[in-house]
């Protein structure tokens, strides 16, 4: 039992060292903040629907820069439990970005939203993603090579807390997305245009209520 605990701790240290090296090459927390910053630039400079669509392409570019990293991280397997939580926490930032970018792209072609409403929705995503960025930074501090002096229990506590908070933010982003799409569906229902909204987002009875 003692040997198993030692191996788990060594494996976690090795994984966190590997992640530290990965962060030196590609920092997912920087990606999250980059999406936030670009989104806020879109909000500040978009005054028409066409203008917003063109500006949002910059957000998509930032998101696409990290997609290869997240896809590669998904393929990492055979990790000990706590290292898996580190991996899953980082991947949830990718999930949040994916929900935002892909859902908002559809909203841009939805006439049931005004430009002002789209700006407000985008700002909401930016706030949620920024909170996720803060969690990711805290996790990064714990797996950074310079903080390996932390006690194992302290490290695992931070990993567990980061995982739980990130999961909460990911679920909140999905809920936020569903509620905003639900507003479009209700507006379309009043105009007898639910088929168009369903074709754009999917069946509301399965996804949004």
Image: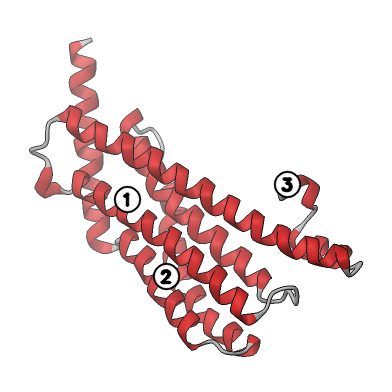
Tell which circle, 2 or 1, labels the residue nearer the N-terminal end.
2
Percent x, y of residue 64: 48, 69
Tell which circle, 2 or 3, labels the residue nearer the N-terminal end.
2
The local secondary structure at tag 1 comes to helix
Residue holding disc 1? 135
**Eye-nearest disc, 1 or 3:** 3
Residue 177, compared with residue 83, is above or below; it is: below
Residue 204, compared with residue 1, is above or below; it is: below
**Eye-nearest disc, 2 or 3:** 3
Residue holding disc 3? 209
What is the count of numbered marks? 3
Residue holding disc 2? 35
Q: Image quadrant of residue 103?
A: bottom right
For mark 1, does the 10 Å Cα neighbourhood hold few (<14), some (14 to 19), or many (20 or more) residues? many
Percent x, y of residue 206: 77, 45
For mark 3, does the 10 Å Cα neighbourhood hold few (<14), some (14 to 19), or many (20 or more) residues? few
In the image, is 198 to the left or to the right of 131? right
Q: Distance between the residues labelled 1 and 3?
A: 29 Å
Q: How far apart are marks 2 and 1 (CA)?
A: 16 Å
Q: Which of the two residues, 68 or 195, is positioned nearer the viewer here? A: 195
């Amino acid at each position: 039992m003692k040997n198993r605990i030692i191996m788990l701790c060594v494996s976690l240290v090795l994984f966190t060292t590997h992640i530290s090296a990965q962060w030196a090459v590609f920092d997912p927390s920087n990606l999250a903040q980059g999406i936030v910053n670009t989104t806020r630039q879109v909000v500040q400079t978009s005054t028409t629907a066409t203008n917003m669509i063109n500006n949002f392409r910059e957000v998509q570019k930032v998101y696409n820069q990290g997609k290869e990293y997240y896809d590669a991280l998904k393929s990492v397997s055979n990790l000990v439990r706590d290292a898996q939580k580190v991996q899953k926490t980082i991947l949830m930032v990718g999930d949040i970005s994916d929900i935002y970018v892909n859902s908002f792209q559809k909203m841009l072609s939805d006439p049931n939203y005004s430009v002002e409403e789209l700006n407000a929705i985008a700002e909401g995503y930016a706030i949620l993603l920024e909170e996720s960025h803060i969690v990711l930074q805290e996790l990064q501090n714990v797996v950074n090579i310079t903080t390996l002096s932390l006690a194992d229990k302290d490290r695992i506590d931070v990993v567990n807390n980061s995982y739980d908070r990130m999961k909460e933010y990911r679920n909140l982003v999905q809920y936020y997305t569903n509620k905003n799409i639900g507003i479009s569906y209700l507006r379309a229902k009043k105009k007898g245009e639910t088929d168009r909204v369903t074709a754009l987002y999917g069946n509301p009875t399965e996804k949004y209520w």
